[in-house]
Image (cartoon, grey):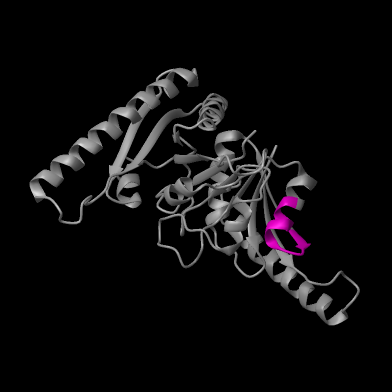
Amino acid sequence: MTIIAGFSSSRQGSAPLNLATQLARTTGERVIAAAVVERTLPAGVDPIEDEYRGYLASRASESLRRLVDRLPGDLDISVAVHHSTSIPNGLMELVNQHSADLVAVGSSSSGLLGRVALGSVTERLVHTSKVPVAIAPRGYPSSPVPVQRLTAAYRGDADAAVLISTSADLAKQWKVRLRIASFTVRPFTMFGGSIEPSAEELVVQQWTHRTTAAAVEHLEEARAQSGHADVEVVIGCGTEWREAVDDIAWEPGDVLLLGSAAAGPLAQVFLGTAASKILRHAPVPAMIVPRR
């Protein structure tokens, strides 16, 4: 059982490794800190490119070893450098080589500190991976605290039952708490000033009440399906997705679980619209699981 902490040859921030080691403290798995060096030509075709790619590989390896050396020595962590046509392809090749069951990556450097942000590489990865992908918020620090709680983002569709089942299995396997959350974005205004503000506010309140009641009903069904004792159910509501995600309490050791969209290929990760919006505002690590 292996976790791949994925890096590019040009960026070796500590967040992916920090998340991978936190997961490893929970699961007992080994970690491979792996940098992927992109190359357009096969080895041996262009000696100058070979030399340059060799230099990048050496520098990436040294950088990863420095990151590993800063961590406590209680975990099984190794370093690898892999050459491939792209970073997502290289990570999937490493998954196959090492029979890994999870890939941990970092957020885009252009994202907000402390929030999950997808860059071009992670965007492609979460739409093509055949194993769960865990994404660390930007600047995610090292922590001795293992995973404490899983929060499954519930959509209420047919595929959500698979996510609840997977979440319950993981919670039992990892011996952590399970929470099921539904996120609802209510309209800030609905009629553009065509009715009195007080009447519009009443309509919004009624809409929120109906939506919340429906979410509670779905969540109670999900709680029963989970088969997991003491499952907490919560609803995050706001006028925008960030407000809805922040409406529920988050703690150190939390991990958000998101399911793949029905439009995606079976046994592959494919991030749907709602899940993508929730992910982009997550203040904790997020893990996207394939539809199996």
Return the residue nearer the eye: 113 or 22: 113
Give the x, y percent position of residue 31: 66, 46
x and y percentages locating residue 148 in the rendered image: 45, 34
- Measured as percent of width and height from the top left, residue 233 is found at 36, 28
Where residue 195 sits: x, y (%)?
Answer: 12, 50
Image quarter of residue 91: bottom right
Q: Residue at x 66, y 43 (%)?
A: 265
Instruction: Tell me what residue is drawn at x 18 percent, y 41 percent.
Output: 203
Where residue 58 sits, quadrant-wise, is bottom right
Whether residue 6 is in magenta: the answer is no
Residue under the point 40% across and 62% down: 112
Q: Residue furthest right?
A: 44
Residue 106 image-quadrant placement: bottom right
Left or right of 250, for residue 165: right
What's the magenta region?
81-92
Outermost residue, front direction?
194
Quadrant that contains the N terminus: top right
Q: How many marks?
A: 0
Q: Quarter holding the C terminus?
A: top right
Q: Residue at x 44, y 17 (%)?
A: 224
Left or right: 271, with 213 as reference point:
right
Viewer-proximal residue among 139 and 232: 232
